[in-house]
Image (spheres, rainbow, N blue to C red):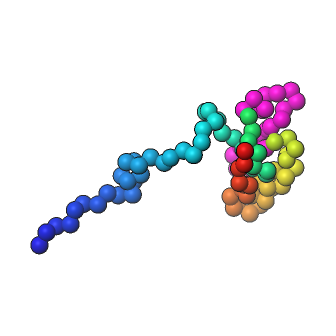
């Protein structure tokens, strides 16, 4: 009886086929978690800022545009209270 050929593990298959990237915006690709808008890294340093990072009680930081700050805080409070992942809106460009 012939032996079966050795099968690759899931990890080995992943290493052989790295994930494809759909698009590239340079090093950082940041989206507001409340509205999904693309945030430029320079927006965090402007005066006044157009984007900011908000921190949950667990210490993780989440990006938000200034206009969505209240909605982002609401989503983080819900995350802190329930322990479930933060509800993030799908990104758009």
Which residue lies at the image location 72% right of the left edge and 48% below the top edge? 92
Name the spot of residue 11 as percent of width and height, x first: 39, 53
Which residue lies at the image location 78% right of the left edge and 32% below the top edge? 44
Is residue 30 found left or right of 73 in the rendered image? left
Q: Is residue 26 above or below residue 54?
A: above
Quarter holding residue 87: bottom right
On-image quarter of the N terminus: bottom left
Residue 73 at least partly seen? no
Query: Which residue occupies the extreme bottom position in the image?
Result: 1
Which is nearer the eye, 91 or 45?
91
Q: Is residue 78 above or below residue 30?
A: below
Name the spot of residue 71 as percent of width and height, x first: 85, 52
Q: Is residue 82 above or below residue 30?
A: below
Q: Which residues are magenta?
A: 41-64
Name the spot of residue 52 as percent of width and height, x first: 79, 38
43 magenta-colored: yes
Query: Which residue occupies the extreme left position in the image?
Result: 1
Name the spot of residue 91 as percent of width and height, x first: 71, 50
Is residue 85 found left or right of 24 in the rendered image? right
Quarter holding residue 42: top right
Residue 79 at least partly seen? yes
Which is nearer the eye, 74 or 23?
23
42 magenta-colored: yes
Which residue lies at the image location 35% right of the left edge and 58% below the top edge? 9
Is residue 17 found left or right of 43 in the rendered image? left
On-image quarter of the C terminus: top right
Which residue lies at the image location 36% right of the left edge and 52% below the top edge? 12
Which is nearer the eye, 89 or 57?
89
């Amino acid at each position: 009886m012939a032996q079966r050929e050795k099968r690759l593990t899931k990890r080995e298959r992943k290493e052989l086929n790295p994930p494809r990237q759909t698009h590239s915006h340079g090093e950082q690709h940041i989206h507001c978690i409340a509205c999904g808008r693309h945030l430029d890294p320079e927006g965090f340093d402007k005066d006044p800022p157009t984007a900011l990072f908000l921190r949950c009680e667990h210490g993780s930081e989440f990006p938000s545009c200034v206009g969505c700050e209240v909605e982002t805080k609401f989503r983080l409070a819900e995350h802190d209270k329930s322990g479930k992942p933060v509800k993030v809106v799908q990104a758009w460009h």
